[in-house]
């Protein structure tokens, strides 16, 4: 099995719950299976509600750090002063204290969004959010081909919860030697990446070294998050779209696809 040992490999792992089932049109006895957990997470900043989303209930502080950064609520971990999470029966609430300047910027952004309700510019605002202007990365060298040896086996070994329950995406950070250092899992691929980014921020991982691997397809929002987090290299196990390749090249993000039975394909930088 590929080596994945680390001091913090998947802290606070997601718990899976056992549920019984019967096979349809079968006389087989009842059996049971582990299913991934899911919870509603409500996030407020300095007492003001901001977002509610469905996530997997593990590594929630990492998720909040990553979500705050990739949604441009903060620009660095030092602007998050405190995170307090309360668990309910089917939901979690997170009270996040951020720096005053970030909070005022957030409030101003909320007022601008509210002011466009019902007017003709709403569509333009939504497009601006979907296709934002980003700050281009510094060009970074591509990882060596040898680092992709047994990559899928490493990913499978790292997905501790998905092995038993399925239904989970994973985002992993591999260092310059190809060793899995961090793995975060979630029902949503964007959530998994936010959790990983949050963990990298908290542990002061150099995002310009190593590579981030996603088990999911490469959506445009993953490109946004990777560039905002200053990740040098993003690797996906499913093919990217044309638009994601264009954006990766535009913002100098190394983008690599690893097919099942072919060598890694470098889409960005352009060949």
Image (cartoon, rainbow, N blue to C red):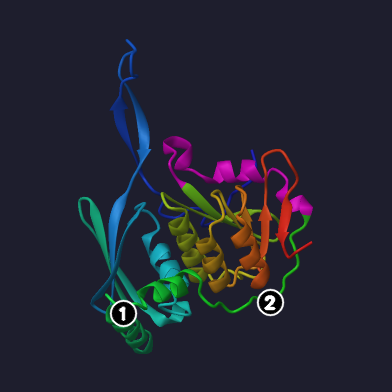
Start-end of magenta stretch:
145-168
Q: Which secondary structure lies at badge 2?
A: loop
Residue 69 visible to the viewer: no
How far across and how far down the image is residue 136, in percent?
63, 77
Closer to the camera, 247 or 141? 247
Q: Taking 252 as reference, is 36 above or below it?
A: above
| Residue 151 lies in the magenta-colored region | yes
Closer to the camera, 261 or 91? 261
| Residue marked by disc 2 | 138
What residue is shown at x 65% (from left), y 65% (from top)?
Answer: 246
Q: Residue furthest top?
A: 27
How far across and how far down the image is residue 258, in percent?
67, 48
Residue 1 visible to the viewer: yes
Q: Earlier in the sequence, mark 1 or mark 2?
A: 1
Quarter of the picture containing the N terminus is top right
| Residue 156 lies in the magenta-colored region | yes
The quarter holding residue 85 reads: bottom left
Q: Which secondary structure lies at badge 1?
A: loop
| Residue marked by disc 1 | 116
| Viewer-nearest of discs 1 and 2 | 1
Q: Taking 261 as reference, is 75 above or below it?
A: below
Position of 39 with respect to 262 (left or right) is left
């Amino acid at each position: 099995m590929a080596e994945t040992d680390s001091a913090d490999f998947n802290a606070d792992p997601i718990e899976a719950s056992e549920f019984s089932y019967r096979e349809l049109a079968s006389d087989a006895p009842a059996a049971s299976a582990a299913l991934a957990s899911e919870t509603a997470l409500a996030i407020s900043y300095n007492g003001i509600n901001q977002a509610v989303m469905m996530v997997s209930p593990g590594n929630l502080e990492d998720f909040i750090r990553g979500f705050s950064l990739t949604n441009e609520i903060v620009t660095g971990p030092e602007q998050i002063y405190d995170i307090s999470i309360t668990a309910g029966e089917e939901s979690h609430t997170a009270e996040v204290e951020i720096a005053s300047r970030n909070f005022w910027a957030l409030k101003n952004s909320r007022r601008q969004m509210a002011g466009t309700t019902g007017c003709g510019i709403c569509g333009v605002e939504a497009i601006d959010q979907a296709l934002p202007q980003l700050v281009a990365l510094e060009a970074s060298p591509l990882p060596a081909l040898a680092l992709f040896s047994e990559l899928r086996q490493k990913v499978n070994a790292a997905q501790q919860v998905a092995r038993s329950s399925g239904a989970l995406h994973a985002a992993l950070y591999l260092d310059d030697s190809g060793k899995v250092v961090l793995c975060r899992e979630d029902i949503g691929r964007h959530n998994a990446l936010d959790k990983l980014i949050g963990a990298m921020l908290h542990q002061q991982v150099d995002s310009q070294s190593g590579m981030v691997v996603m088990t999911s397809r490469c959506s445009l929002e993953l490109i946004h998050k990777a560039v905002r987090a200053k990740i040098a290299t993003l690797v996906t196990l499913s093919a990217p779209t044309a638009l994601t390749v264009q954006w990766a090249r535009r913002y100098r993000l190394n983008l690599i696809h690893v097919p099942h039975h072919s060598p890694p394909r470098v889409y960005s930088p352009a060949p």
